[in-house]
Amino acid sequence: MSEETIRRWIRSGELEADSLGRSYRINEDNLRKFLEKKGIKYEHTPLTKFANEMKRTSQGIVSRTVQNLEKSNSLKEKTTFSNENTVNNNLKETKINKTDIKELPKIPLTLNTSDNNVTKEFYEPCLQWAKNYDRAVGYFTSSWMRVNAKGMSVFASNGGKARWIISPIMEPEDIEAIMNSLRLKDGNEYFTNVLKQNVELLKEFLEHDTLNAIAWMVYDGIIEFRFAVPTNNLEGDFHDKFGIFSDDKGNKLSFNGSVNDSYKGTVNYESLKIFQTWKSLGDFVKDDEKRFERLWKNKDPNVAIYKLPKAIEKDIFELRTRKRPYTLTGKFVNPMDKWRHQSEAINTFLEVGNGILEMATGTGKTRTALEIIKTLFVRKKIRNVIITVNGTDLLDQWYRQIIKSTNLNVYRFYSSYKELSGFMLLPTNSVLLVSRNPQFLEETLQKMGNSVLKNSIIVCDEVHGFGSPAIVGKLKGRISGFKYRLGLSATPEREYDEEGNKFITDEIGEVIYKFDTEDAIKRGILCEFEYYPLEFMLTQEDKVKIKKIISTFKIKEEAGEVVDHIQMYTRLAEVKKVSPAKLPAFKDFLDNHLEILNRSIIFVETKEFGIEVQNILIDRFPHYHTYYGEDDRKNLSRFSKGEINCLITSKRISEGIDIQSVNNIILFSADRARLQTIQRTGRCLRINPNNPGKKANVVDFICVDSEQDQESNRISIDVERREWLLKLSQTRREE
């Protein structure tokens, strides 16, 4: 048996051997089976003699250095397994120093997804080591890039260059990311700066905005894609799967196998065979290199290779525009990073298909929903959209956003708009904005057939309102027929309403993603705020009212009547919401903090109480206006433009309205349920681009008269709210 024969077995992968620098290590059991399969008697080989010598000390592992082999008198032929003795002159470049061995990735000769984590055990060590990566693969999606974010971040930061030959059968959003790279103008400083920053930040960039990361990598020359189309003697798809990693010292590794560059490639049963020049397998590597270069240079007569511009000319892809997710500045910033929750929410919904996104006021629920809608259209998953919410202001806001960011046809069915019939005539590539009022929504659903529902998404904004008794009674079982159902709310749960919550869950789905106010402040999406809890004690008249309410319910309860305690607590809360005892506390506060009225919204329970507040303001701060049910809606527009500095209102702008310049909120009226308080405080927490150092203020009124709480045998709702808002006000920006 010659040295070349043994080396050929190792090179081909038939005989497994681990490289130990100047020697090889062979498992004795594997060796026995291998030789028996070859018809060679185990005890008659030079290897087995050495195996017997090592058996006692190495527990069946055969390891022999060159020097020991040369000393063995039993060997009739000089047999050496040194990596420094090359197989032929073509592999001289594979000679490596002993000091370099530690830097090379330790990869077994074979891997499979059942026994191995291909990402952790193969791609990550290779990408972190290599300077060049050539890959020919039949199927590529951006999910591979997302799964391999850690390795790709190091590869890019180390100045690596990658070339991909892929089939043009790609996901639409991946096509879009690559195509966008052609449209990037002078502005690559951003990504260049990213590469100079620490590796972890780039890892975050890849994980949370993968598609745009691909586009920038293509633009900056880190990745180049070419597209393979079988032609002449071949037909079908380009379906090969092989690749080559190499460093700048001449060390190379190639691999072949069934693994595509996709997420499914990590969860299907797949396998790889690995060939490394430092394991004397350079012949295989060289063959893969030649094959790749032949394809890359379009020299294979049966495979046509297209560069990106030619792919456009041949109409392989359809292009749509995506807005750049960040701005370029003089110093390195990563504003896209702080909005990564939107990508997370989008991906979560697209995986599930229905459910609720619980996202704090001001964190981009509308934008996130629109991105979901656009993605579903690009993927040809839907033909039309229904968006429903209560309130003309919110529906008008949706209308402006859709017109601004999409090319979809928009129809309105709310207030004075009666465009439902137009939508039904031309529902393809269309959006219908419809009031959540059961009258409008029920009529809409009655006219929509199953064919429309099965190709639609319904978006229920402020989804907590979807559980109202009127909607539950009329629309039960009517919403779940939509192909996709998306709910949006900062506070989706309805307190004290089990039936309403069940309806929302049954029709829309569970909460599938959450990003709350504390998360948003820490990330710098919402601003920090100061909290001013102003204490007051109930008047004697208030106490009489409270005692009367409690005694009335107790009498009914003692008489055996069914008593609704929620109704009792609601009536008790109403007494405190309009207590005149709050007004002196407010006057005293204004004497020292008059600036709190600048760019402020004052929430009151009733118009009558609002008049009492106006009487306080009229001499101190005349630049106010009211916004109640009967008031002109233009007042809201005037306030948003700064023409009105202070707005007194009730519930009209608790939900959804985006006014970035609100600095201060004054809560004369606050519910026990956090829903309303979160929405109202959220009005002032939005970041204002014109005031980057903005810090908001929230003024609250806390009843410290414990007598009524003892009477009702419950913890003060004001005290609960104060503890919660005090804790939230201590949240500080971390990013």
Image (cartoon, rainbow, N blue to C red):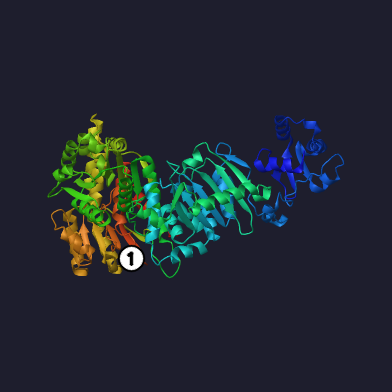
Quarter of the rendering containing residue 524: bottom left
Specify whether 515 is left or right of 543. right
Residue at coordinates 40% horizontally, 58% vertically from top-left?
181
Q: Quadrant of the C terminus?
A: bottom left
Specify whether 678 is left or right of 615. right
Reading the image, the residue beneath label 1 is: 689
Mark 1 residue type: Pro
Numbered circles on residues, count = 1
Q: Residue furthest toward the bottom?
A: 330
Front residue of 99 and 243: 243
Front residue of 488 and 733: 488
Q: Is residue 68 above or below residue 628?
A: above
Q: Position of residue 165 (x, y in %)?
A: 48, 50
Q: Is residue 275 above or below residue 595?
A: above
Q: Is residue 162 above or below residue 69?
A: below
Q: Quadrant of the N terminus?
A: top right
Judging from the image, what secondary structure is the residue with disc 1 in? Answer: loop
Q: Position of residue 677 (x, y in %)?
A: 30, 52
Residue at coordinates 46% horizontally, 52% vertically from top-left?
207
Front residue of 46 and 345: 46
Q: Position of residue 589 (x, y in %)?
A: 29, 64
Q: Residue furthest toward the right?
A: 73
Q: Residues within 10 Å of mark 1 (few under 14, many from 20)?
A: few
Can see residue 570?
A: yes
Can see residue 727?
A: no
Q: Position of residue 191 (x, y in %)?
A: 46, 62
Quarter of the rendering containing residue 422: top left
